[in-house]
Image (spheres, coloured by chain):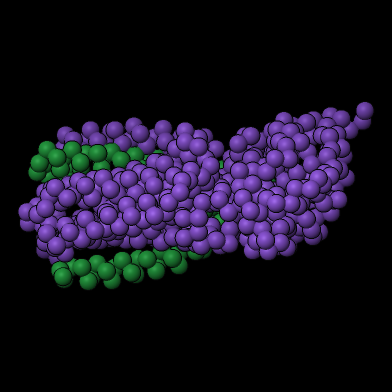
Chain colours: A green, B purple
Amino acid sequence: MPADFISNLYLFILAGFVGFEVIKRVSPLLHTPLMSLTNALDAIVVVAAIIIAGRHETVLSTTLGAIAVAASFSNMVGGFFITDRMLRMFKTGRPQK
Amino acid sequence: MTSLGTSQLLDFAFIAAVALFILALRWLSSPVTARRGVLAGEIGAALAVGATLLNPELVQYRWIVIALIVGAGIGIPLGMVHMTAVPQRTALSHAFGALSAAMIGIAEYYVGVPHVTRFEMGEISLEVIIGSLTFTGSLIAAGKLQEILPQRPITYPGQNFVSLSTLSAALLIAIALTVNPNETFLFPIMVGVALIFGVLLVTPIGGADMPTVISLLNSYAGFSAALLGFVLNSKVLIVAGALDGSSGFILSVIMCKAMNRSFTNVMFGAFGQVQASAAASTEARTVRSASPEEAAAILAAASKVIIVPGYGMAVAQAQHKVRELYDVLTKKGVDVKFGIHPVAGRMPGHMNVLLAEADIPYDHLLEMDDANSELPQTDVALIIGANDVTNPAARSDPGSPIYGMPILDVDKARTVMVIKRSMSPGFAGIDNPLYYFDKTLMLFGDAKAFVGDIVRELSGGAHH
C-alpha cells in the first residue's frame, strides 16, 4: 500500500466531514443552486484532464483526455454561470430598490 | 525561501483553490452571501486551472485549447437554460462530470499498463465503474426529466435480479483485473458492464423519485472524482470530490426522509408497483368544485393564504401567473406565503428556484415545518399541481403506501382549494382523501389558465 494512500485517506475523511458540516447549514431554499455549485467545483477534475491531454503520451490518452477536458470544463463554465443566474433571482420582500 | 519550484507554485494554487471552495459552500448558507460564494468558487477554479496550464509536464497545448473551447461552447448554453429545465441540466452535468472522471481513469490504465500495480488497479477499477454507471444513469435521468424517455417506472419481472447480477459481474471483473492488471481484454468489458448497469439502475425509477435519484447521482459523481484523486494522487480532486460527494449524500438523505423511504426502497422498490393493492376503496364519493369567480371571492375575503406548489405548476409553466396572483392578493392586504415540501418538483429546491425566477421574495417561501406551524391559522390553502405531499392519508391511514411520509398539513387550513386537471390520480395512483373533505374545493382546469382567470376576477371583476 503506497504511503500516499494513507495521507490521502486522512484528507478525504477530513474533507468529507468539513463538507458535511458546511453543507448541512445550507438552507433548503438554495438546494438547487447548491447542487449546481458543487457540480462546478467538482469540475476541477479538468486539471487532471488537462495533464492527460497535454502530456501527449498516446493517441488514445490524448483523445480521452481531450474529451474529459471538454466535459468537465463545460460543467465548470455552465455550473458557475447558472448558479449565479439562479442566485440573482433570490430577492427579499423588504423594500430596497 | 530562495527559489520556488513550479511544483510548489502549483501546490500553493491548489491549496488556495481548496480553501476558496470551502468558503464558497460556507457562503451559500444564506441568500445574502451566496453570490460571493460563487465568486470565491470561480476564483479558486481559475487559480487551479491557470496553474495547471503552466505545468511543465504539458508538451502540447493544441488539444487542450480545442477541448476548452468545445467545453465552453457546451457549457455556456447549458448555463442559460430556462429555470424549468434546471433538473435535466443538472442530471446532464452529473453525466459530464462522471464521463470526465471515467475517461481519465481509463486513460491512466492504458498509459500505465503493463506497469500498473495491483493496488492502483483496484483503485482505477472502482473509479471507472462508479464513473461509468453514473454517466449512463445520469443520461437516463436527464432523458426522463426532458421527457424523451417515459417518466413512469419501467419494470419487468426479475428486474432486481438482473440489475444486481450486472453489478456483481462488473465487480467480479474488477477483482480479476486487480489480481492480474495485465489482462487488458477484461478492462473494456468491465467498462461496458458498468455502463449497462447505470442504465438498468435508473430506468425503473419513476419521475416522482427523481429528487432522490438526482441527489444520489450527484453524490456518485463527487465520489468518483475523489477516487480519481486517489488514483492520480491529486489532493485538490480528493477535497473537491469529497465536498461534492458529501453534498449529494446529504441531499439524498434529506429527500429520503421527506418521503419516509430508504435508499434501497427508492433504488429497487419502483414506486408504481406498491400501489396496485392500495387503490382499493373506489366507492363513489362526492367532491365540491368551484369556478374561478367563486375561488376569487374566497381568496379576496381571506386574510392569510398559503400556496402549495408542486411539479404540476412547473409543467403548466404557471409560476408567472402565480406571481400575478401573489401581487393582486398582497395589494388587497392578504398575507400570501408559499409552503414548499422538500420533494416538491423534480429536484431538491426546484420550487424555490421557479418562484424566485417569477420574482417572489424568498422570505415568503416557507419550509415544510414553518408552513405547518402557520397552516392552522390560515384561511385558504391553495394547492397548485401538488398531490402526494398534501395527502392526509400519510398521517392517518397505515394502509396507505405513503403512510409516515411528512406532509404539508393543508387540511388544517379553514378552506382548501386544489387546482387539478381532473380527479384522476397521478401515476403513483394514490387516492387523496383531501379532495373529498367538506372544506375542500376542487378547481378543475389547467393551472396556468385557472390562476389567470382568478387574477382577472380579482383585479377587474370586483364590481360587476
Decide which of B201, B14 is in the foreground and name it.
Answer: B201
In the orientation shown, which residue stands out farthest toward the front? B157
Q: Position of residue B167 (x, y in %)?
A: 32, 55
Which residue occupies 61% across, 47% down? Answer: B428
In which quadrant of the rendered image does the N terminus of chain B lie?
bottom left
* Furthest residue toward left: B114
Which of B421/B107 is in front?
B421
Q: Position of residue B190 (x, y in %)?
A: 23, 50
Residue sitting farthest toward the right = B464
Q: Is residue B159 above or below residue B447?
A: below
State the image coordinates of residue B56 (x, y, percent, origin top left): 11, 48
Q: Is residue A30 visible?
A: yes
Compared to residue B428, the image places residue A11 above or below, namely below
Q: Is residue A33 left or right of residue B303?
A: left
Judge left or right: residue B189 versus residue B59: right
Residue at image position (44%, 40%) is B142
Q: Quadrant of the C terminus of chain B?
A: top right
| Residue at horizontal 39 percent and vertical 69 percent from the top | A17
Q: Residue at x 20, y 42 (%)?
A: A65
* Of the pair B317 and B39, the residue shown nearer to us: B317
Q: In which quadrant of the rendered view does residue B427 lie? A: top right
Q: Residue B25 sits in which quadrant?
A: bottom left
Q: On the rendered structure, is A30 left or right of B405?
A: left
Looking at the rendered structure, the number of numbered marks drawn on it comes to 0
Q: Is residue B459 visible?
A: no
